[in-house]
Amino acid sequence: MSTIERITITLTAEMAQAVRGAVQAGEYASSSEIIREALRDWRHKRALQEQELGELRAQVQEGLADIAAGRLRDFDAERIIRKGEQQLAARDACA
């Protein structure tokens, strides 16, 4: 089990009230439990962002390799925009 370390955080009044409200409503046992869940969610989100960034980097490298090998297509901005919109919609649907 991990060692527990106590730290102090500062929240806006609105955030602090939301935390207190969730504890008072019985949704969480303590404010620490809320913060731990928020940090788990944050770490998960960062991991997904890193994965997406890695995939984009791989696609850029693939594109550069295609250019170097002479495998090119005509530039079609509309196609690129449509593909980007589709990828964003798919990502948002999963979130």
Image (tube, rainbow, N blue to C red):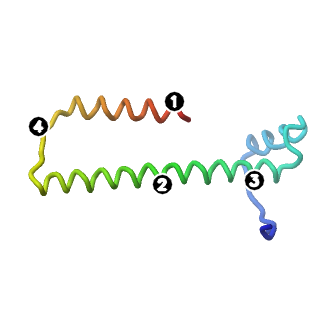
Residues tagged 2 and 3 counted as in contact (Cβ below 8 A): no
93 up-or-down from 51: above or below: above
The label on residue 74 is 4
85 up-or-down from 61: above or below: above
Q: Residues within 10 Å of mark 4 (few under 14, many from 20)?
A: few
Q: Residues within 10 Å of mark 1 (few under 14, many from 20)?
A: few
Residue 58 position in % (x across, y down): 33, 54
The label on residue 36 is 3
15 up-or-down from 82: above or below: below
Amino acid of disc 3: Arg
Viewer-side residue, 13 vs 92: 92
Residue located beneath label 2 in the image: 50
Quadrant for the N terminus, please.
bottom right
Q: Residue at x 19, y 56 (%)?
A: 65
Q: Indicate which disc, 1 or 4, sits on the residue closer to the N terminus.
A: 4
Q: CA distance from mark 3 to mark 1?
A: 26 Å
Residue located beneath label 1 in the image: 93
Viewer-side residue, 7 vs 53: 53
Q: Indicate which disc, 2 or 4, sits on the residue closer to the N terminus.
A: 2
Amino acid of disc 4: Asp
Secondary structure beneath disc 4? loop
**Comparing labels 4 and 3, the label whose residue is closer to the camera:** 4
